[in-house]
Each structure stands twice: as structure tokens, then as C-alpha cells.
Image (cartoon, rainbow, N blue to C red):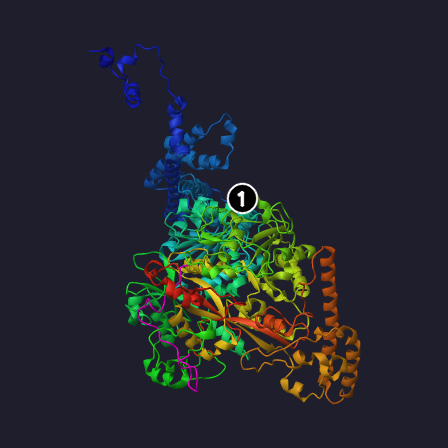
Amino acid sequence: MSDLDTEVLPLPPRYRFRDLLLGDQSFQNDDRVQVEFYVNENTFKERLKLFFIKNQRSSLRIRLFNFSLKLLTCLLYIIRVLLDNPALGIGCWGCVKQKYTFNGSSSEINWAPILWVERKMALWAIQVIVATISFLETMLLIYLSYKGNIWEQIIRVSFILEMVNTLPFIITIFWPPLRNLFIPVFLNCWLAKHALENMINDFHRAILRTQSAMFNQVLILFCTLLCLVFTGTCGIQHLERAGENLNLLTSFYFCIVTFSTVGYGDVTPKIWPSQFLVVIMIGVALVVLPLQFEELVYLWMERQKSGGNYSRHRAQTEKHVVLCVSSLKIDLLMDFLNEFYAHPRLQDYYVVILCPTEMDVQVRRVLQIPLWSQRVIYLQGSALKDQDLMRAKMDNGEACFILSSRNEVDRTAADHQTILRAWAVKDFAPNCPLYVQILKPENKFHVKFADHVVCEEECKYAMLALNCICPATSTLITLLVHTSRGQEGQESPEQWQRMYGRCSGNEVYHIRMGDSKFFREYEGKSFTYAAFHAHKKYGVCLMGLKREDDKSILLNPGPRHILAASDTCFYINITKEENSAFIFKQEEKQKKGQGLYEGPSRLPVHSIIASMVAMDLQNTECRPSQSGGGGGGNKLMVPTENGSGSRRPSIAPVLELADSSTLLPCDLLSDQSEDEVTPSDDEGLSVVEYVKGYPPNSPYIGSSPTLCHLLPVKAPFCCLRLDKGCKHNSYEDAKAYGFKNKLIIVSAETAGNGLYNFIVPLRAYYRSRKELNPIVLLLDNKPDHHFLEAICCFPMVYYMEGSVDNLDSLLQCGIIYADNLVVVDKESTMSAEEDYMADAKTIVNVQTMFRLFPSLSITTELTHPSNMRFMQFRAKDSYSLALSKLEKRERENGSNLAFMFRLPFAAGRVFSISMLDTLLYQSFVKDYMISITRLLLGLDTTPGSGYLCAMKITEDDLWIRTYGRLFQKLCSSSAEIPIGIYRTECHVFTSEPHDLRAQSQVSVNVEDREDTREVKGPWGTRAGPGSGHGCHTSSGDPAEHPLLRRKSLQWARKLSRRGTKHTGKVPAATEWVNQQRLSLYRRSERQELSELVKNRMKHLGLPTTGYEDVANLTASDVMNRVNLGYLQDEMNDQQNTLSYVLINPPPDTRLEPNDIVYLIRSDPLAHVASSSQSRKSSCSNKLSSCNPETRDETQL
């Protein structure tokens, strides 16, 4: 056998260490020295010190024993007093007892009753034993705590009291006559108080409780008062043995009366020693008690600031959620409380706020309101400290909301703080559900373990992007994620406010289909069939569902999706089905002509028409009608079979099961005919082919992959610069590019990763290639290479360095060719010394652009929603003043959406990211809200799920008449689900009664002047508020005439002369004339602004032919802008337009021209495989059904 086989391997280290401990003989011959560590702790003294002092639990037991001994000595003293009777005789142990009688007239004091007492033998023995134990314990502690200075231990008050109360008893063992000697054992109450303080400190240290300072101070104060009263009672009782011989009860009564400063005078000390003791006790009370009260008040104030704690008993018996924030502002608090407690099942929950800063004055004032003081607990502390998390009882919480501080200058640092808080909470309470708000998308993956995460910049940019192609998407989403009962504005005299307020109460709810009265009758039917009939019968809008075996939510999965009883249905309604009452007896009455919405809650409509249930479905085929001839594939074209005569045109029914021959979507990946662009002869631009695919470079981790329109080859970084040419092209302005569609300009401070989410929804695969708008990023700071690498694959995306407050930058980026301008709130201005001044610069800049470019649609992001009243501000706007009063009234009524009636918000022209905070709050009750919102915004793309788009109602589409018939038409033809309407209508904003205007004899018109008669056509007709179909009559602008500026003073003088003739008759006419004169001056101001813009364009070398201001717009252009809510007519303060969103309006709501309908269109790629055989024949006839429409170009 070889040496390797015979060699014994060494033992593992653990066995060698064990042998070393056991003293293995094999190591005795080695030159090794065994070293013992911590030898000094093995001494007898150190072990005693460890047991009596250092060890928390054993020290606590020792102090508890010492406290019990002191209480026992006080109890023995009371027993001795009760058993002692001075009238029976006074003397030492074994001496003859002498009787003593007090003589009040004599000034001499007999000291014998004070020096000697009567002590029974058994009582003496117990007191001696207790005193001996106390003496030995005291000496042992002195020995253990001795550090070289014996006097420091001896002169302590506690040591002196111990010696006074223990040594005399020990001496009486050896000298029996002194056994009746008086010993002030009642002073042991102060030693008991000291032992109790130490015991409580050790107790709190042992269980790691640090929030008990308030409890300690209250206990100390109570013990101090008790010791003062007990000492005074026992001392006066004993000294008065030489006087009137008071008992303990009388002495206690005297002390209480004296210390309370009442002083009845019925009981008084008779001899000077007792009187002197009273003086001493009062002096001690006047010194000690104020100090104790001062400490107590200080701790009380500190506790008020820190908020105390949430008791363990309450946490186990009650439900609570924890809100962690960096700094708590009143707006954030009220938004959270109003939204959280808006749900009935959360009324019994408590809210514990954990904030590291001191409570704000406004917050403290609000939390003192009885409505909140009983349910909201404020704790000052940090989520990174386990002690503070224990105070908040985080491990027993139902949920923890962690919100970021969006007002911080450094938003990345704010996210880092949020991440650490989330980690700390997850480490302390791993079972507590986490709801986290993050600011930057690149930081989202750090908190992906949280149950629900809302990334602010992701949602913000996606929502602003959709605002450019689906007007007022921000208002639509905001209303959906706010809790409301639809009672806002119901007492307003304005019809649009009542209808808008009622529809704002619609929210998203869910229910299992098998348990639903709304949907269970449609089991086995197609999704589109169930959506239409549920809306027709109950007025609910079925928007999506979720399979039982699949966690993904599908919005409008299409007509081929067959409903099952186990599906979870998501629908839009005023309230959830569980809170609805079904009155089936009224169905017959409702079907006979009173609509589907009856009763006091019925929405007002322009006219009562025949119910949509009576829609003529006779003589119709089983497939959707196809338009022929000049219809051009219009989905809403009047059917040819019933389109003539007096009979109302019919609409094809919605099929229970999808028919592949009647409804086939086009394959957007293979059929490119819809996107082919044929350049005209006068265009020299080359056609760039786009491809569909996933963006190769994502700027951050965690972005959802979305199929987009992409360039076949990445564009060089130099070609992304709009205002500078390069070797690839020489274009230096937007005009030279020759874009076919209007620009979308985004003004931002920096090119953050969130800006990527602005581009993706606008380049998604389901957007038609012909309708892609060029995107220009106007950035204050130059973007980095990582961001350029991420956007260089998208077509028609450019950037330019400049600021929104610089007119030259706006002109160079092509603002005169833009249809939409998005102004993103700058991070550097989000924090200001005065909170609400953070939006000052943005508001003023937008107001300037609104005056310079009135035809431009501007969407603005603000930090504070309350500042939206300053958008498009006009000082003499009486209607805005009325809306302000309405907002205050709604806020007093407790509305969560008091700002909803502000015209900029209703029209979708202003947005604040704080409005989406409720999305995170609602997720506590509706865990699907974040997923549905991300699907609507295009942030997530689930296979088979639809997407949000919009289409416009034209004059040719009014044959459909009502929203219910439109619902049926869309479901039967293209399987699209409408969820709301964006309506723009003319409105007369006036504070005067209409009859005064009618009685006025002043009639001024442009045709009264001979030199302005040529503009009579477009100016002579004006749409009033009573027009049946909104503001669709032709209207123009008198400033179109070139002589108007020169003749303005003559016209004003004529107005003045005509006004003076009727001054005495109708005083109201004078004000109207002044308004007309003011409008002329405004015309002059607009001309000056126009000249300013043109001069700057000439200075920059830009062509001025594209610039359009109000004075140069044609009548049709003006009304097109007005109808879409882009142009607020400043010429006349009395006439204007307003736009608002109607979510899930009633089926009998009449359609009006220029209505924009929000649609959830099914996924074009969902059923490509099943329809591949008949794709060619179907796509040519139904191209319009799968092309996304835009609000300007697409006909319905």
C-alpha cells in the first residue's frame, strides 16, 4: 500500500477545537499556551456586580425586592402607631411606664412621648430582621459600586436614610432598653420612591421601551406627592404625641387641607416642633413640586410634538394603517383622509402618521377637529428606527403607505429616502402590505417587492402624451380615480355643471360575473354583447375582465372573448352593484318613453327622446351594414337600406357570438397598406419606411415593453437636433422638414427617464402611421447620451435646447406649426419659500404664450391644484368668479373634487400630479386600479388587452342621435367600447340677466360702417347659447379686415356717441358699449403682439408665412379651434366656449357636433392567427374600423 493510502487525513477544525477544550493529550507535548480571556470577570466581585448591577433582569429583581422591603417597613410603622397608646404609659424597654397629660397653658414640652414608643416584641423582631437585610444589601451595593472615593458613597442622601432607619434596630439587639426608642421608619417611603424609579428604568431598559418618559414623570410626581403627605402625616402625628395626641386619620386630614392651601383651621399643631415640621414640609413642597410639574409640562409638550404612541392593545383590537411621509402638508393630509375615509368599510380604521418632522400648525389645527381627532394619530419619528415602527405598531398594521416628498429640489434624493423607508418597513414587518409612491422611474425596481407601486413620472408623462391625441385624458383619469357620489354641482343652475358633476361620480368597480345581477345573464355570450346590453339595461359600462386562472386584466378583449361565470368583471358606474337597488317593476314604464334613468337622480339631457330600447332593428341583416360608394368605409355612415324616407335609420344588432365574416381586425404587422404614404409631385422629401418592433434601448430598468413604430436604422445623434443641421441633413427649423402633421412640443427642464414614457404612447403600434405627430423636446439642459440612445430609434422625435420663457426658442422649435404644447413643471421651481408660489413662473409663462399664440392648445402641469384658477386668467371674468364661489361651496359640502368645475381642469388644459395620489390610496380597497390605469395610459401592454383612443362626432354622424345608439353602432361594427364624451359647447358668460340685454336699444354691428361692410359675412352670424347642437354655426372675427386697426378709433367714437343717446334710458347699455370699446383696444394689443412675433421670426431668419394669430385666422379655423376648446375668445368677455368630460353618460344623452368620444379599442393583434384566411377580403372593406382616429383628421 502506498504512502498516500496509509496517510491519515487531519480531523476537521470543529473536532480539533473540541479536543482542545477537552484537553486532548496529543496537544500536551506541543509548545502551546492556553490563554483564558476575560479573567477579571471570573472574580467573585465581578460576578456579584454582574448579578446585582449589570444584568438587567437580575438587577430588576433585586430592586423589586428592595422596593418591597421599604414598603414593608412603612406598613410595620403604621401597625406600630395603631397599636401604640401613649395614655397607657411611656418609657423605655423594661422601665416603669409613666403617664403624661398635655397642658395647653404650659409652654414646657415633655419630650418623653416623642423619644419613646410602645413596640411589641413580635413587631420588634420583624423590624429588626427587615432592617438587618436592608443594611446588608446597602453595604453590599456600596462595596460593588465603590470606585476609589468612599465619601462619594457615604454622603449620599439614600445612604444616610438607610443608616438612620437600620442601624438603631441592629443596636437594640445588643442593648435591650433601646427597643422602645422612636425610629423614623416612615422616611423609608423616600427610599421606596427611589427604588421604584430605578426599578422602572431597569424594566423599560429590559423590554426596550424608550417612549415611557411621560409615564415615568407622572409616576415620579405622584410618588413625590404621596411621600410628602405620608411624611407629614406620620411626622405630625408623632410630634403631637406631646400635644393633643392626634391619630393618623386626623393628621392625614390636616396635611391634605394644608397642602391644598385650603386651611380650614379646625385642626392645628399645638407644640412648636410639629409647627416647625409643617413649615419645613411646606417649604419642601414649594421647591420640589414646581420642579416636578415643570418637568411634566416639558415632557407633555414634547409628547404633543412627537405624538405619543399607539398602544399594543388598540393595535390588536382595532384596525389601523400607517402613513410614512418626509414632511406632512395640509393638502397631502386632507387628500389622503378624504379619499381613504370615502369608502364605507374603512370608517372604523385608524390612521397612524409617522413623520420625522414636527407637526405643522395647520396640521395640528385640523387634527383637533373631532372628525379626525378620534381616528388620526400623529407620531413624530423615523421609519428607519425600529423603536418608532414599534410605536406605530407597524407589524399589526393593515397597510403602510410610503409617500415621496415631491417638493424636494433633488427628487432622486427623495426617492432614495423612500426606498430606505420601504426596506426598513419590509425588514421590520414583512407581512405588512406596502403601498409605495416613487418619483423617478429608474428607482422603481428597488421597491418592486412592494404590493403596489405608483411611479409619478411614468404616469405623468404618459397622461400628458395622451392629452395630445385624446383631449382631457388627464381629467378623465383623475375623475375615475377619485371617490365621489356624483352630487357635485347638482344645485347649480347651469345644466352642464349638473351633468358634468353627476357623471364625475362614475368609478371603476369589480364583481365576479357569477355573482352579478348586471352580467350573469350573459354567461357564454361575447364580451361585446354583454357590454352593450349591460349598458342598455342598467347603464353600466363593462370595460374589462380578468380570467380566474390569469392575473392579467384585459380591457375590451373583443367579441371573440366568451364570458365565464368565474370571470371578474370591471365596470364603470356611479356606485358598485352591491349598493344598487333593482326595481324591475318600472322597466315597462321606462321602456315606453321615459328613458333608462328615472327619478331625482336622472341626468339632465337636452331633450327627451324615444328610448334606445325602441331602436328600429327590423328588416336588418345579421351583419354590420357596410357603407358603399362615396361612404369611404365610414363606420358611422347612414345605412343604405333604411337611410331614405321618414323612417329612422336602423343599427345592426350586437351578436351574441362573434362572426368571423362580419368582424375581422386587420393585421397591423403584415398589412402595411394603411400606412403607405404617397408623396405628391411637389414634395421632394423621401419617404422613410418604418418598422414595428420593441425599442432596443430602454432608459431604465422595469419599463414595460411596448410594440412601437421604429426607424429601420437608428438616427445619428446629430440628426436629433432640430435647430442645427448636420452632414446628414441641412434643416435648421421645423418649416424645412415639411411635416405633414402638426407638431407636439414638450417643454421640460431636463431629459429625465420619465420623458421616455411621453414618446412611447405616441409611437405605439396601434397608432396609424399617417397620423404620427412629430415630437419636439424643448429642454433647458442638454440631454445625456443614454437618453439620446433610447429615443434615436423612434421616428420624428427631435430635441432642442431652450426655455419656454424665451420667445426665440419657441419660434425655433416650430411653435407656429404645433398643435399641442405641453409644459412640464420644472423640478427646480417645485419648492419655494411660500408653498403655493412654486407655480408662479410656469403660470406667467403659459399666460404669455396664451396671449402670443391663442390658437395653440397648451397643457400645463402645476405643483398645486389650487393654482389652476390662474390659468388663462382674465381680471374681469365674472363667470370665473362664479365658479370660484361654486368651488368654495362644494368644498364646504365635503367634496373631494371641489376644483373640478374650474374651466381649465374640466377642459383638460391643466394637470397636477398630486391629483393621482388618490390612485395609490384607492388601491387599498381596489387593488386593480393601478393596473387598469396603466393599461389606459399605455404604460403596460397586455396581449389581448385594448387601448384608449378617441374619435370625433361630425355633422354627418348626428343620425345616430344618442349615446346609446352610438354604443350599439360601435359594438356591432368595430367592437369598440365607448366610456365617455369630451364635449365643447358655446356658452354665454355674463353676470347680467338676458332680458336686460334684450331690452337694450343699443345695436352695434360692423355693417353700420361703410368701410367695414366687406366682413359682414363671417361676422354677422354668431352662435348663441341656445343653439341646438352646440357651437357649430359659422362665426368669424372682425379683425380679419385690414382697415379695422386704422378705423378702430372712429368706430370707438361712434360707439361712444351712440351710447350717450341712450344713457338716460338704459344705463346697462353704457357698460356694454365700454366693453365693445375695450375689445377694440384688445384688438390693437393683439396686433402689437403679432408684430412682435413676426419681427422676432424675421430676426431669426424664419419664414413668417406660417404664423397665425387671431387676426389672421379664417372663420372656419377660428370655430374649429373654439369647438375643440383651444381658443378662449378674449375679444368679448361675455361669449366664450367651455369643454368638459362626461364619463359613462346615460344612453339617452344626445350627441352634438364636435363631441369627442373616448373609446377602448380591442387589440388589433389579438386574433390575427384565427382570421388569417379572410384577412385580405376583410381588411379592404373595414380599414376604417381598425385605423385609430384623431380628433382633427379622422371621420367617424
Q: Residues within 10 Å of mark 1 (few under 14, many from 20)?
A: some
- Number of numbered discs overlaid on the protein picture: 1
Q: Quadrant of residue 1025?
A: bottom right
Rendering coords of residue 104 (x, y %): 52, 52
Look at the numbered disc 1 and give the secondary structure of its residue: helix
Rendering coords of residue 741 (x, y %): 57, 61
Q: Quadrant of residue 852?
A: bottom right
Residue furthest to the front:
681
Q: Quadrant of residue 1051?
A: bottom right
12 on left or right of 359? left
Q: Is residue 381 visible?
A: no
Q: Nearer the viewer, residue 21 or 823?
A: 823
282 on left or right of 193? right
On whether residue 657 falls in the magenta region, the answer is: yes
| In the rendered image, the vertical position of residue 619 relative to residue 972, given as above or below | below
Rendering coords of residue 147 (x, y %): 49, 27
Q: Nearer the viewer, residue 297 or 1091?
A: 1091
Which region shows up in magenta? 640-667
| In the rendered image, the vertical position of residue 312 relative to residue 1159, given as above or below | above
In the picture, the quarter occupied by the N terminus is: top left
Q: Is residue 169 visible?
A: yes
Q: Which residue is mark 1?
A: 786
Instruction: Name the main secondary structure of what is drawn in magenta.
Output: loop
On whether residue 352 falls in the magenta region, the answer is: no
| In the rendered image, the vertical position of residue 977 relative to residue 822, given as above or below | below
The amino acid type found where label 1 is placed reads His
Q: Nearer the viewer, residue 890 or 237?
A: 890
Rendering coords of residue 929 (x, y %): 42, 60
Q: Nearer the viewer, residue 3 or 820?
A: 820
